[in-house]
Image (cartoon, grey):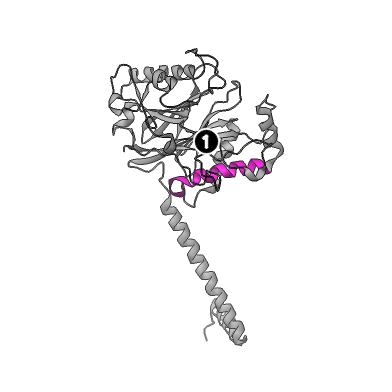
Amino acid sequence: MARKDPSVKALEQLITAFMRLPFRMRLVLVSVLLVLGLGILLTYWIRSRHHERASFTPDSAGPKTVLLCHWNLENLFDDRDDRRRQPDEDYDRWFVNDPETRTWKYNRISDALVALNGGNGPDLVIGNEVESYRAAELLRDYLNAKLPAGGTPYGHVAMKELDAGRHIAPCVISRYPLSGAKLLGRRQRILEVHVTANGHDLCLIASHWTSKLSDQGNDETRGRFGYANVIYEEYRDAIRAQPGVDLLVCGDFNDSPESDPVAGHLHVSGNINSVTPGADPPRLFGLLSGKSPSVFGTHYFNGPVIYDQIAISPGLLDSIGWQYLAESVQVPTSGLIRSGSTTRRPWRFGSKSDPAINRGFSDHFPVIAMLKVAE
């Protein structure tokens, strides 16, 4: 007589034991198994849907759509005591000694960023008022931890720390490779870095200009004028070497698009017809030039003002390499205004002296724009 397979015998014993249980207990066990099975199926479905929502895979072939976001993050300090001088020392000690507040700040910023781009976060994040490379890395880690299953992580960070009055500077966090990071000017918060996708290069210049309150007089070689002059010189050299260069300038300019530093010295124009290869002088197209502060205001200073801006070279107006998708610029405000407020005013995070219950995100709104990269 053939021996019965041990696994079959074990299954028969399990069925026999199950049938000997009271009817109600059998019913409960069956219900539990059904719930567990449905839970597993639901989890698999959610994960597959999240995978479908992932915006792209950087290494995949074909044209790509890239969401760029610039945001002044309002004193984003890290978890290390660097013994800064005032006023940075207050934030330095505060963020080190109060991890709950630090975590709250990073969660606020990363939650707002990941909510963009259909819940996948921007593909390029340009932050301002960042204390250190460590702070940029922390923000990258918070962003990656909040991405949906299957979402493409942020694998690249670029920043050059700078002690220029205050120890805060621009940084770039990207899904695409970054290279050639360097500071422009002399003790100025101007970061240049190159972004590569599909073999196409984008020259990105991020900056944080001095404020009107700190600038003294009308010296056109210093302050905001000095920032505009340095960036424009770099742009003019780039466009002379390569007329079709894809170059994007962004930052907190602490001035309006129509101001003399922006329109006169950086040569930013809202007239797209004047931004052409070979133009003399070379111009940049301002995505927020000519826009209404009541709709596109990024900061609040005696009313909404457009201080955070993006300007592009003629190369980003054609379909070769990188391209700006027309009228895609936006200033998102959803959830970034204090609940119950009727004013277009960013919900700031504030300082240590502010009540914790009133802490928001930043005293600036982000600016986003959609770019396309050719195959």
Indicate left or right for 30 with 294 as reference: right
Q: Nearer the viewer, residue 324 or 143?
A: 324
Q: Residue at x 28, y 22 (%)?
A: 277
Q: Is residue 287 left or right of residue 142?
A: left
Q: Main secondary structure of the magenta part?
A: helix
Q: Pick the quarter of the image with the C terminus.
A: top left
Q: Which residue is identified by label 1?
A: 364
Rendering quarter of residue 194: top left
- Residue positioned 52% across, 67% down in the render: 39
| Residue 106 visible, this angle | yes
**Farthest residue toward the right?**
97
The residues colored magenta run 100-120
Q: Quadrant of residue 348?
A: top right
227 on left or right of 95: left
Q: Position of residue 81 (x, y in %)?
A: 69, 31
**Residue 157 is at least partly visible in this image:** no
**In magenta segment, residue 105:** yes
Whether residue 161 is situated above or below residue 59 in the rendered picture: above
